[in-house]
Image (spheres, rainbow, N blue to C red):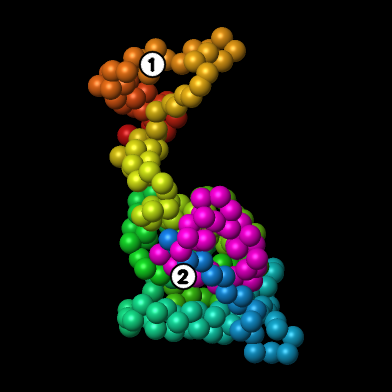
Amino acid sequence: MRFHVLTLFPEMVLDGLNTSIIGRAIQSGKIGLEAVNIRDFATNKHMKVDDYPYGGGAGMVMQAEPVYLAYQSVAERISVIAETSKKPRVVYLTPQGSVFNQRMAEDLSKEEDLIFLCGHYEGIDERVLEMIVTDHVSIGDYVLTGGELPAMVMIDTISRLVEGVLHNDDSARYESFAENRLEYPQYTRPEEFMGRKVPEVLLSGNHAKIAEWREEESLKRTRERRPDLL
Ligand code: ADE
């Protein structure tokens, strides 16, 4: 899986993802990450990438041309590397998109290349969005200052579904949202912490009983915290 992020703040994306599990996956080549600076594709001498909105109103709008040129440079490279003429999926991060969830992450994890387009200011000229965007995605019903954090959230979520990124392949399967349930509670040593004991069944060594207990806890937790999932 190769991620290509079109952004005005490439270092934000690279710095944010180059640590821990995702950082290691990048180092080992399990996933690829590049951040392309849209400003590098400005064609005016001030490297300006935004302008006033037609029709008036607050704020500035990102111009179509630099976004299109940044997209084109990445799309051309992808078609050479992947030896395909198939157009890559382009995810535009926007509060006006479908709300991201684990199912969308699984679907997107099947792609070889994914392009993320991060907007700023009051958005991007609609014409270039019509031309290149395949998926409009929001990470929740609230408004952020730009698409970088949402892109990072999506890249993290998708990356851990890519084979070899997590050490234990099982751990991506048996956890919250697998089968639309929240995960059961976990415990580790010591057996007693400030008077609170680890549930007896987990120390029993009876795997059938443990599986049954986890199933019940998982259901109970989902009913209490996320009844909408059931
Ligand atoms: N850009 C600004 N807010 C956003 C959100 N909630 N999701 C995705 N992109 C955004």
Q: Which mark is residue 115?
A: 2
Q: Position of residue 10 (x, y in %)?
A: 62, 68
Q: Could you tell me the amino acid type at mark 2?
A: Ile
Q: Is residue 192 left or right of residue 90?
A: right
Locate the C terminus and report the quarter of the image it occupies: top left
Nearer the observer: mark 2 or 1; the answer is 1
**Residue where numbered disc 1 is placed:** 203
Residues rendered magenta in the picture: 1-29
Task: Answer with the quarter of the image where residue 41 lies.
Answer: bottom right
Q: Is residue 129 above or below residue 213?
A: below
User: Observer-nearest residue: 113 or 91?
Assistant: 113
Report whether residue 101 is seen: no
Ligand 1 within 8 Å, label 2 CB: no
Circle 1: is it few (<14), some (14-19), or many (20+) Cα within 10 Å? Answer: few
Q: Residue at x 36, y 55 (%)?
A: 163
- Any part of residue 16 in sight: yes
Residue 90 % position (x, y)? 44, 70
Magenta span includes 26:
yes
| Marks 2/1: CA–CA distance | 47 Å
Please tell me whether residue 47 is drawn above or below residue 164 in the rendered image: below
Picture coordinates of residue 86 (x, y %)? 32, 79
Q: Is disc 2 placed on a helix, strand or loop?
A: strand
Amino acid at the residue labelled 1? Leu
Task: Please tell me which residue is depicted at 48% across the width and 75% down the height of the picture.
Answer: 129
In the displayed orientation, state which residue is furthest to the top: 195
In the displayed structure, does residue 206 sit left or right of residue 200? left
Residue 168 x/y as whole percent: 38, 43
Picture residue at 44% right of the left edge, 84% below the top: 76
